[in-house]
Image: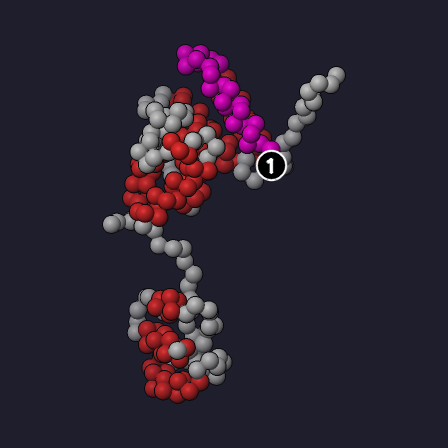
């Protein structure tokens, strides 16, 4: 199975595509480490030979880089993360929290708390939210929409 | 929710304080308490607010200085003395 995976890796490498071994990353549970590729075209000819090698590493010559990345953002995951962060905030009662609850009118927070909440969101999602736009975000739903907007998440 | 210019400046200052104090232990509770306490001032008392705002800016500069490491305080235990 590892050999078949290697073959897929080589073929996707030989094709000038950006999605480098993305199928492999999902298929391989444990990281079989990198194998070094010399020349993509000539390697395709050698591929029957790699079937024999199977698990061996250095003797085969294919380099397949596995890029680590964060899990993809969807509206659902953004909403879960936003609600999770809000539940951790000590001034919010987790039972009363809904996606449509207004921070000031329903939850009784004030503008200083709202600043803290937006900062927590910035830390969670890893990007800066400018002040002009931050002061308009008054419900969890609006925060989710804003982040989806900024991160280009469509459904 | 329309904030006046001064209110917006105060909120920006609050944000800057929280950011600056992130890696320095002991500042965050003090900052939060101070801002919370002064939030009670009436909106019309502009002189006082502006005074506190300037004071806050100077304190922010002190906080940002690399030599400031942490904040601690003494408190008198209840029931003694």
SS at circle 1:
loop
Above or below residue B9? Residue A41 is below
Work out whether residue A58 or residue A93 is closer to the camera in this orientation and state it.
A93
Q: Which quadrant of the rendered structure holds the N terminus of chain A?
A: bottom left
Above or below residue A63? Residue B54 is above
Total marks drawn?
1
Above or below residue A123? Residue A1 is below
Residue B81 figure quarter: top right
Work out whether residue A142 or residue B53 is closer to the camera in this orientation and state it.
A142
Residue B46, position as x, y percentages in the image: 44, 14
Above or below residue B40? Residue B66 is below
Residue drawn at (32%, 47%) of the image: A76
- Determine whether, in the image, residue A55 is placed left or right of residue A135: right
Residue B22, position as x, y percentages in the image: 54, 38
Q: Which residue is mark 1?
A: B25
Segment colored magenta:
B26-48
Residue drawn at (46%, 19%) of the image: B39
Residue B34 counted in the magenta span: yes
Q: Chain of mark 1?
A: B
Residue lying furthest front in this view? A95
Q: Residues within 10 Å of mark 1 (few under 14, many from 20)?
A: few
Work out whether residue B23 or residue A30 is closer to the camera in this orientation and state it.
A30
Residue drawn at (38%, 69%) of the image: A27
**Residue B12 visible:** no
Residue B3 counted in the magenta span: no
Magenta region, mostly helix, strand or loop? Answer: helix
Residue B4, position as x, y percentages in the image: 36, 21
């Amino acid at each position: 199975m590892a050999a078949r995976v290697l073959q897929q890796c080589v073929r996707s490498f030989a094709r000038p595509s950006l999605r480098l071994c993305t199928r492999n990353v999902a298929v391989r549970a444990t990281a079989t480490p990198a194998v070094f590729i010399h020349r993509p075209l000539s390697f395709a000819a050698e591929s029957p030979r790699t079937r024999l090698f199977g698990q061996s590493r250095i003797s085969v010559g294919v380099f397949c880089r596995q890029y680590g990345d964060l899990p993809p953002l969807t509206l659902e995951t953004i909403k879960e993360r936003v609600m999770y962060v809000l539940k951790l905030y000590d001034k919010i009662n987790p039972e009363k929290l809904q996606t449509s609850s207004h921070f000031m009118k329903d939850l009784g927070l004030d503008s200083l708390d709202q600043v803290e909440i937006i900062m927590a969101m910035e830390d969670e999602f890893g990007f800066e939210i400018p002040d002009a736009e931050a002061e308009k975000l008054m419900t969890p739903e609006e925060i989710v929409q804003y982040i989806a907007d900024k991160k280009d998440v469509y459904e | 929710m329309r904030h006046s210019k001064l209110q917006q400046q105060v909120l920006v200052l609050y944000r800057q304080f929280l950011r600056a104090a992130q890696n320095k232990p002991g500042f965050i509770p003090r900052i939060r308490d101070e801002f919370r306490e002064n939030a009670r001032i009436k909106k019309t008392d502009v002189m006082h607010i502006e005074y506190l705002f300037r004071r806050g800016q100077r304190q922010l500069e002190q906080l940002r200085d690399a030599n400031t490491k942490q904040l601690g305080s003494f408190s008198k235990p209840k029931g003694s003395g």
